[in-house]
Amino acid sequence: MKHLVWGILCLLFAGRAFAGETVYTVDCRGGGDFLTVQACFAALPAKSAEWRTVRILPGTYREKVTLDVYKDRVRIVGVGGAGEVRIVWDDFSGRVVDGYEMSTYDTWTLSLQADDVILEGLTIENDAGRVGQAVALETRGDRIHINRCRLVGDQDTFFTKGYVSRIWVTDSWIEGTTDFIFGPSIVLFDRCRIHGKADSFLTAASTTERNLYGYVFRDCRVTADDSVERLYLGRPWKSTARTVWIRCELPAAICPEGWRDWHDSARKGDVYYAEYRCTGPGADRRGRVAWSRELTDEEAALYTPERIFAKKTGSEQFRRDWNPLLEETWMKGD
């Protein structure tokens, strides 16, 4: 019933938000308005007051792509879904291009820097391999919704880079090896598959002290390659990291202690690591580190989209509504 209600809400809000918008079509075979995704993004009028839709037709788009900070209110849709539409690049930390040595911050395949962005039905991949940090998707803007996508990489697959960014990831697949979901943003993951490909860490949040919420995983399923034996739910990139797993299915590969302190005992005092009613062989909390916690029913009830994405999150004031996407249900909380 919950999924049915969610589906109806999405249809209603999508219809209200995007009826009559300008549509741009990208086709690598030459049948659209643009051959490349980047050419389409570059052509979008800046600072638009209206929503636009970018349709990407099936194919593999081998390019490094930026949706810049002036291109707000864009819906990016893969026609046929994530199995049919792939954006792929292979930069990695330490790679030298034209005399410049890249850092982690340069390696993304797709960088979403604008506010009010919907990403739907796409695979975003960094196929550099196991060569160190290599980001597939980087998000910097606020109010980003990622739906039915696949984020594919190894180390550092998904960089939630924005310090005051709110991101909702629904029904998506995210895979990687080390710290493959990392950064300071407020992110809610609903019904996602989180897949570990090596003994390592699923998350490395760097939540700021301003925010009451960091990474929240609800009703997600964690899986692992057959060779994986020791996965950690997270380690703190910053000492104020906040990561919570709610009603998630955890495999046997989750190690008993569950969490690590990044070899810095001082970080244990400020982190907020919690679980609530998780299931599966990796959900047994009897061996968990003492500085993690089990949420009470009352605490778990506070993890709703309305609260997580509220205008006030800690002391941070978010002045703009998410308009029009889900504004009536996301922004009522304080």
Image: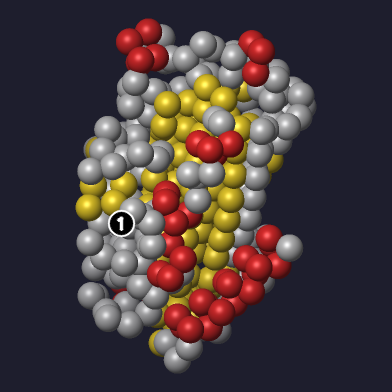
The residue positioned 26% from the left and 65% from the top of the image is 320
| Residue 237 percent across, percent down from the top left | 37, 25
Task: Tell me the element at label 1.
Answer: loop
- Where is mark 1, residue-wise? 311
Residue at 57% in and 55% down: 170
Q: Which residue appears at 76% of the width and 24% of the height?
A: 281
Q: Nearer the viewer, residue 142 or 111?
A: 142
Residue 280 in the image: x percent, y percent? 76, 29
Residue neighbourhood size for the residue with mark 1, other residues' Cα within 10 Å, grouped as few (<14), some (14–19), many (≥20): many
Q: Is residue 126 left or right of residue 68?
A: right
Residue 318 on image: x %, y %:
25, 56
Where does the N terminus fall, quadrant-wise? bottom right
- Look at 36% across and 44% down and name the residue there: 185
Q: Is residue 105 left or right of residue 152?
A: left
Picture quarter containing residue 117?
A: bottom left
- Where residue 309 appears, x then y in whole percent? 39, 54
Q: Is residue 227 above or below residue 63?
A: above
Res 3 visible: yes
Question: The disc labelled 1 sits on which kind of residue?
Answer: Lys
Judge by depth and name the residue closer to the eye, 200 or 49: 49
Q: Is residue 230 visible?
A: no
Does residue 245 sit above or below 32 in this rendering?
Answer: above
